[in-house]
Amino acid sequence: MVGRVLPRSSFSLDGSASDSDYELDSPPLTWIPSLPALDDNESEMILDEYLAPYAPLVRVASHPDRGDRVLVAAKDFNPGEVVFSEPALLDTAHAVAQHFAPVPGLSIAPDYQRLMYEFVVHAVYQPVPTSTAAHALLLAELSTDGMTSALAERVNGERIAQYRADVKTFRDKIKKRFAKRGNKGAGSFPTTETLLKLLYIIETNVHSEDIKTGPAVTSGDDNDDVEAEGKEEHCVLSIVASMPEHSCKPNALVTFFPPFSPAPESAQTVGVSDIELAKAEPVTHLLFTALQPIAAGDVISIAYQENSFLPTRVRRGNLANRGFVCNCRMCAGPDPDYARAFVCANPMCRALVSPVGVPRDQESYVPPPPPPETENEDEEMDYDDDENGGDDEDPDAQLVCGRCGEVVATMGEIVAAEARLAHDPEALLAVLSPVLDVFSRNVPATDTFSARTLASVLLGDCLDHPDLTSALTDPDSGVHVSPSHFLVYDALKQLLFFDADAIDRVMHVPALMYLVAVNFVALAPSPQPLALASLHAAPSDESSEVEGDVPATDAEWTRVIAWNGDVQHNLLWLMKQARARGNLELAQWASDRGLDTCAAMGVAASASGAASEFGDVFSRPRSLLAG
Ligand SMILES: C[S@@+](CC[C@H](N)C(=O)[O-])C[C@H]1O[C@@H](n2cnc3c(N)ncnc32)[C@H](O)[C@@H]1O
């Protein structure tokens, strides 16, 4: 039976969780019979058997339109609840992968090579028969369509062609290495075709997280290759974890547990054979946590890519790399696309208004051209399909403000504004940099454990635990929370945009409330860079005073938020939420900062006013701002 990952009794808040904290109640691998090669029937039977322990939680089903597989909840889950966890089958943090030096000069990413190597070791040596069978299952069952679809061919044609040649080179090199060691395995060496398929499987299904320091690359003995170039990530492949579909507005979050840490130095592994290393237990579990309420029968979705800030056509362009066009609720369904929010042109209103996406079919989709060669991979968002007709949004369609009923903009204007920003990284940076600066300097973004902890906490898990409250309120507790960390960011995003009721769950923990409030202000403008741009709210001189530092005092916070009038809107929203729920402390906090912001902007609002006056601002925002 799959259990919750953080039993309250062993909840560790300082990032130094002991081994026992990481004990997961996951399905053991021992039930799988040893089966290195499977025919279709066997594979299906064994897949059923593999899935059986997960059945109380999730099941695999066919997507009604696409026909491929999706993962469906077998019961209800609350936000913050662990849906399931699964041990890694291939994992770059595993000893055997860590102590492999990737072959340089190949188009196959070094971390993918590590996974492929781990697979080869299992196929050849079969060090742990049960997991070897699971690896065979992985090969037989997981989808390859990410890189083999017509769309992927169109987008990544050259890379796919190169893969075949490079997989052969990789295989030859590794085979030689094995031969040098006298390959005494009971299994056989995978063919080039098998390894190519594995690479496609990896491309389509792998989960990855950034790692701060590169993995230790030391083979110690007979490994004469130099480490391959390229930034590495922590990559993990498993079976159930490969089933959830992508959504730009996901209902679940996947995290690695525990987060990556480099393998011990070579001293301990010099002379240790691959087969010995491969016997080590799985290192990482993939943990799926509900971000929104999930009802039995709902399809479970995760975000395959970080979507933050990206317009729909850019998100779709990036997903085209993976061979599919996203038709999620935000790209093509009824849900507004907050990332494309615009500020209402009515000066008395200034609400944020978001367009709704249009459906696409896979066949007719014309992917945007690849971005220009750049050293900065963040510029992935430079994708632009305006010129090739890749986006068929009606340019005359009008975006109408839900609050005041005015036309905010036409879709044509929105697309043009997005394109302008996409082509003008400096303008975009000017809009975003103060936000990013606050984000990146606040606290280190590296402590994924506490970031994940916070994410789970924000989403309602473990809220009442007394250790948690004291650790968060104790400045010496060592809890580092980075609002820049995407988990926290995602959690907050969900909290603020998708699940206003979730705020109830954090309201009664003052320390959390403060964190939410602080992060909220830092975060508030960030999901709407385009809206920010539409405000023409370049950072004022005041912002430069705080640019290089973490806001420590209320006055500094006031200056941070003062450069963007939109923050007022969000502060007012926060204050309203807090008041409606009887949380006067938070309401006061938001109120004070709202008034400070008005004052800082030279607005004739009473800087000494009380929460109720700020409440008036909420009901007629522009009347005061205009004053
Ligand atoms: C990790 S696999 C998910 C499991 C897969 N559906 C299967 O049957 O094995 C990723 C593949 O699922 C499909 N997929 C996932 N999310 C999708 C989405 N939002 N829209 C269209 N296809 C999607 C794509 O074919 C993608 O390459």
Image: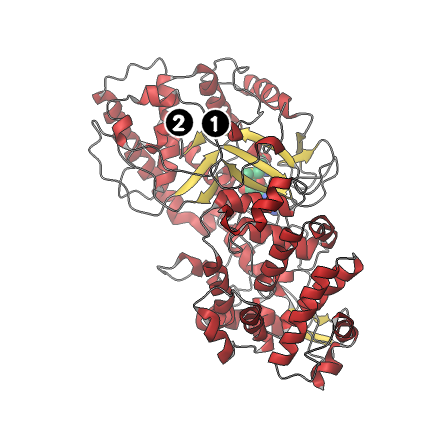
In the shown orientation, is residue 577 left or right of residue 66?
Answer: right
Mark 1 crowdedness (10 Å alpha carbons): few <14, some 14-19, many ≥20: many
> 550 or 282: which is nearer to us?
550
Ligand 1 has an atom within 8 Å of the beta carbon of the residue at disc 2: no
Return the mark for residue 353. none
In the depicted structure, whether residue 561 falls above or below residue 606: above
Say which residue appears at 59% left-offset and 32% top-offset: 5
Q: Which residue is mark 2?
A: 119
Q: Are marks 2 and 1 in contact (CB under 8 Å)?
A: yes
Q: Colour scheme in the image? A: secondary structure
SS type, badge 1: helix
Return the mark for residue 139. 1
Give the position of the C terminus as an image quadrant. bottom right
Where in the figure is residue 190, as x and y percent of width and height?
Answer: 36, 24
Where in the figure is residue 366, as x and y percent of width and height?
Answer: 54, 56
Where in the figure is residue 204, as x and y percent of width and height?
Answer: 50, 40
> 324 or 276: which is nearer to us?
276
Regarding residue 61, the answer to whether it shows in the image is yes
Residue type marked 1: Leu
When asked about the image quadrant of residue 62, the answer is top right
Residue type marked 2: Phe
Locate ligand 1 by image quadrant: top right
> 128 or 478: which is nearer to us?
478
In the shown orientation, is residue 274 left or right of residue 415?
Answer: left
User: How far is the residue under mark 2 from the one under mark 1?
Assistant: 10 Å
